Amino acid sequence: MSRPPSRLGNLSRHRDLAVAGGVAGWILGVLVLDAGAGNWQQHGLGLATWVLLATLLRRELVAVRLQVAVAVIFATWIEYTFAGQLGVYTYRLHNIPAFVPPGHGLVYLGALALGRSALFRSRRRLVLGTVLAAGGCWALWGLLLAPRRDVLGALWFGCLVAFIVRGRAPLVYAGAFLLTAYLEVLGTALGIWTWGLHDPTGLLSIGNPPSGVAGGYCFFDAAALALAPRLAALLSAATRGRLARRRLSWRADCRNDLTGAADRG
């Protein structure tokens, strides 16, 4: 006779959706507050976002923490390059708001939570098919019907398709599409940031937001998934090295103590 699922089991199954829902709610709250915030208020929102990210990561494995760290570092570098230097998009106060770096960590964690959730895994084909169909329709609208022709968005949608079809974690990329589409539509609607008319070369027109922007975010996710295991291996090797050095030092101390005792004898 099969045993009924325990309360803890149910909580564990629903935690991933709770994390993703919490991330979506936090995005809404921060962006609404930022719409009328100054620099100091942005610093406060940034601190609160770091605290939330650290709190959520306390219940995650070391591998997930490393993935989030890679995503934050890579995304922050992209932010300061594309927004700070190249002007591909511009924030309301012409800065990089303090909540953006930890916000990227939350977005990655939310996408990961959706990708590993029981809901997504049990409906894998439906989730992936829906994401590809919705993204494809958005990309076509951006190319043919949008007020601003969106060529870059269509190219990024092609990247999203490649990640989903050939990537290591297609459900994570599907989760990234849902969260980043929500984030970008909300952020641009509130005027928190605005995308430029063209890419830095002047050749590719850009929507506001680009339709396939999730394809760009997926590069952060791919970097996190690829680099985190290597970082874990390096940390493990460094830890083993420290332990080995401590053992050698302890043995040397023991030999010295014995030698000193023999000399005194």
Image: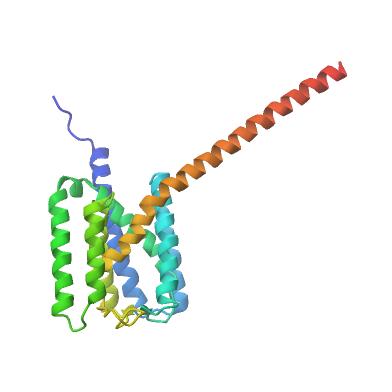
The image shows residue 84 at horizontal and vertical percentages of 44, 77
Please say whether residue 61 is visible from this viewpoint: yes
Residue 116 lies left or right of residue 51; in this view the side is: left
Q: How many marks?
A: 0
Q: Is residue 129 above or below residue 248?
A: below
The image shows residue 174 at horizontal and vertical percentages of 23, 57
Q: Nearer the viewer, residue 53 or 198?
A: 198
Q: Nearer the viewer, residue 18 or 205?
A: 205
Q: Identify which residue is drawn at 44% across, 72% down.
A: 80
Please say whether residue 58 is visible from this viewpoint: no
The image shows residue 89 at horizontal and vertical percentages of 35, 78
The image quadrant where one finds the C terminus is top right
Q: Is residue 236 above or below residue 191?
A: above
The image shows residue 159 at horizontal and vertical percentages of 26, 63
Residue 92 lies left or right of residue 40; in this view the side is: left
Q: Identify which residue is drawn at 38% across, 54% down.
A: 224
**Residue 259: quarter of image:** top right
Q: Identify which residue is drawn at 77% across, 20% down.
A: 258
The image quadrant where one finds the N terminus is top left
